[in-house]
């Protein structure tokens, strides 16, 4: 191919030969060709005049392209895995070590001793009196396949190396070991290596041992014409396992498997490639629909969209596929599969989007969200639909000993129950004015809002980088409520500030500040009608004492108290706001070399906090500096 196209990965223009040279060893030629055709943008051809140039000019242009290809192949750095960090012992023992871990943690599972060349796990509570269900494939898809060996699902599972089909001998060994007079069913995913190795192993078992062996081929992926076997294969494992456990014949189990295969369709989406094995192929702000479970190219790359849009796209394509043309009078079972690296928080958002979509009424059984058929650390998920029959629904809900299999649930959302009606913090107080106190509070809030970036940056060095955001949020909420404040009532305003801090500040800071203000309110209530000048400093110290009693920190703990306490002491000594500000500044400076015994830096290594001001204490000094001006 002499055509030039633009690679979306880096935006540069290459010929097919250049692209092939770069990706050689990482992807096969078919995968590179698919990437070239689907993702790389053709460059417009030159004008007819240029195309009809003299042969000599053509020869020179061709030589120039060849030189560019050679230079590019040499200059482009070799890219390794995007995320090479792994918890392993040796590269050569990854699969064996993982299989041993599965056996240690799973009851009634063992392996054959022809290890590590033959990697087979099987049920130890199996007596060969029923039809055996066997499946397998490359490692990297855990818990599939070994995690589904158990009563009510697989009898044995065979593993290859990562993303590589098991050998013929390994499949043959599994068949011979677990197959009795009732025969066995091999569940094969539609990949060339799996088809060849499993089929030949079945023929050997029939010929050499006279065993009754049948095979079925799963091909649920509707993203491409390849019809790959992906997460929908698990429907076959579960239903066939349940039928075998019930004592059904091999012919009955195979017929059910074929019916399940015909009624199943899947599609996935990913925000990343398999980062533990490959360079990142999906650009920032992009996602790939239909990416294969080994990182094979999908159907298209599109802009990242909301969970709702992603679910709609997957469901539209699944239900528009030929596999889902038949009517579904009994609805669908939906398996929500985590491809490896999506946080459970986000997987639940996908389920929420699904059950709020226009298809929610047709989802009669929900399985997941869970990692079931993964692709190492792919940041993606897939949906698999099974067109239900009453028998399929019963079999999906049948008992299994496999801990990795999620319980099939009929999705239901109970109406939210009304909780206690919380009293508004302003209900007991009437707005009133005190120009001086109002001005001080406004200065403090504006200072916190303006310091958001500074404090977040400081907190990123010794905490979780949200100190400024938390305090700025509280400052904004207080500013919004200024017209409701009982400024002429010292105890009332402290009570209101305590409520606002509790409601608007996350983490422990909000609680502690609320306790401080509530402690101040209690002390001011005792003082009767005394003014701020008379009762304020003592109330401030009382509030801090309540904070220390609740939080366990004190002066010298490297927290906000290292600025709050000196400021309170200065006010009690009559030094005013200027003196309190200076004392707070000195307290902040001291935190640079104070060993933390509480707060955000308590578990941070000394090398990280040494010489850095405590962000909470810094916020206090900023507030007092603003109020003293």
Image: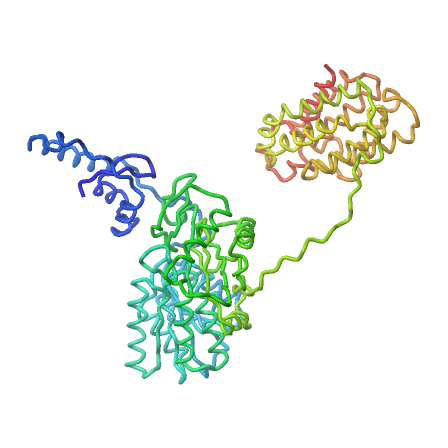
Q: Where is residue 161 in the image (x, y as percent from the top left)?
A: 36, 60
Q: Which residue occupies the foreground of this view, 451 or 222?
A: 222
Horizontally, residue 119 falls left or right of residue 32, namely right
Horizontally, residue 358 falls left or right of residue 116, namely right
Name the colour scheme: rainbow
Q: Which residue occupies the foreground of this view, 128 or 354?
A: 354
Horizontally, residue 74 falls left or right of residue 48, namely right
Indicate whether 158 appears above or below 13.
below
Furthest residue in direction top, as rendered = 629
Furthest residue in direction bottom, as rendered = 181
Q: Where is residue 607 in the image (x, y as percent from the top left)?
A: 57, 33
Furthest residue in direction right, as rendered = 528
How many numbered markers are drawn? 0
Residue in view at x 43 percent, y 39 percent? 285
- Quadrant, the N terminus: top left
Name the image quarter holding residue 134: bottom left
Name the image quarter holding residue 586: top right
Horizontally, residue 542 falls left or right of residue 75, namely right
- Quadrant, the C terminus: top right
Q: Position of residue 421 (x, y in %)?
A: 78, 46
Q: Which residue occupies the foreground of this view, 360 or 553?
A: 360
Residue in view at x 77 percent, y 21 percent? 438
Q: Where is residue 397 in the image (x, y as percent from the top left)?
A: 55, 70
């Amino acid at each position: 191919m002499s055509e030039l196209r633009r690679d979306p990965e880096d935006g540069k223009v290459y010929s097919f030969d250049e692209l092939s040279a770069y990706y050689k060893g990482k992807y096969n030629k078919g995968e590179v060709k698919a990437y070239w055709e689907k993702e790389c943008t053709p460059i417009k051809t030159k004008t007819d005049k240029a195309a009809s140039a003299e042969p000599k000019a053509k020869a020179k242009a061709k030589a120039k392209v060849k030189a560019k290809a050679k230079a590019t192949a040499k200059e482009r750095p070799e890219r390794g895995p995007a995320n090479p960090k792994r918890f392993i012992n040796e590269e050569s023992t990854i699969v064996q070590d993982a299989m041993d871990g599965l056996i240690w943690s799973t009851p009634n599972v063992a392996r054959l001793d022809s290890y590590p060349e033959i990697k087979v796990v099987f049920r130890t509570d199996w007596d060969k009196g029923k039809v055996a269900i066997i499946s397998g494939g490359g490692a990297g898809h855990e818990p599939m396949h070994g995690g589904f060996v158990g009563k009510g699902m697989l009898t044995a599972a065979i593993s290859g190396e990562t993303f590589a089909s098991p050998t013929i001998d390994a499949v043959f060994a599994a068949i011979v070991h677990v197959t009795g007079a009732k025969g066995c069913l091999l569940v094969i995913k539609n990949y060339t290596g799996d088809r060849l190795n499993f089929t030949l192993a079945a023929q050997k078992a029939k010929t050499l041992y006279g065993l009754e062996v049948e095979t079925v081929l799963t091909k649920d992926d509707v993203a491409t014409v390849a019809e790959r076997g992906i997460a929908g294969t698990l429907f076959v494992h579960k239903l066939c396992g349940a039928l075998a456990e019930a004592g059904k014949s091999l012919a009955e189990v195979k017929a059910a498997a074929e019916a399940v295969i015909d009624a199943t369709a899947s599609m996935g989406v990913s925000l990343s490639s398999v980062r533990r094995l490959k360079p990142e192929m999906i650009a920032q702000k992009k996602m790939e629909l239909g990416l294969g479970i080994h990182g094979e190219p999908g159907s298209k790359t599109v802009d990242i969209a909301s969970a709702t849009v992603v679910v709609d796209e997957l469901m539209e394509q699944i239900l528009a596929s030929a596999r889902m043309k038949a009517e579904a009078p009994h609805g669908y079972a939906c398996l929500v599969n985590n491809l490896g690296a999506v946080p459970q928080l986000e997987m639940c958002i996908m389920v929420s989007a699904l059950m709020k979509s226009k298809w929610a009424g047709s989802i009669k059984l929900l399985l997941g969200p869970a990692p079931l058929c993964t692709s190492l650390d792919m940041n993606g998920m897939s949906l698999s639909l099974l067109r239900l029959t009453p028998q399929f629904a019963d079999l999906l809900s049948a008992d299994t000993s496999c801990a990795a299999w999620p319980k099939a649930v009929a999705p239901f959302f109970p109406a939210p129950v009304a909780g206690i009606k919380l009293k508004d913090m302003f209900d007991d107080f009437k707005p009133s004015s005190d120009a001086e106190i109002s001005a001080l509070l406004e200065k403090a809030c504006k200072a916190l809002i303006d310091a958001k970036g500074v404090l977040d940056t400081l907190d990123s060095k010794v905490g979780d980088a949200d100190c400024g955001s938390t305090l700025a949020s509280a400052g904004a909420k207080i500013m919004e409520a200024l017209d409701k404040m009982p400024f002429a009532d010292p105890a009332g305003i402290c009570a209101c500030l305590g409520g606002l801090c509790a409601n608007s500040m996350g983490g422990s800071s909000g609680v502690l500040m609320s306790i401080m203000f509530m402690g101040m309110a209690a002390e001011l209530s005792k003082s009767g009608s005394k003014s701020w000048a008379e009762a304020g400093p003592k109330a401030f110290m009382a509030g801090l004492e309540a904070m220390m009693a609740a939080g366990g920190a004190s002066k010298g703990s490297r927290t906000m108290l290292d600025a709050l306490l000196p400021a309170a002491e200065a006010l009690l000594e009559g030094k005013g706001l200027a003196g309190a500000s200076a004392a707070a500044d000195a307290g902040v400076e001291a935190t640079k070399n104070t060993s933390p015994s509480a707060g955000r830096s308590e578990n941070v290594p000394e090398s990280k906090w040494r010489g850095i001001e405590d962000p909470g204490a810094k916020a206090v000094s900023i507030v007092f500096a603003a109020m003293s001006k």
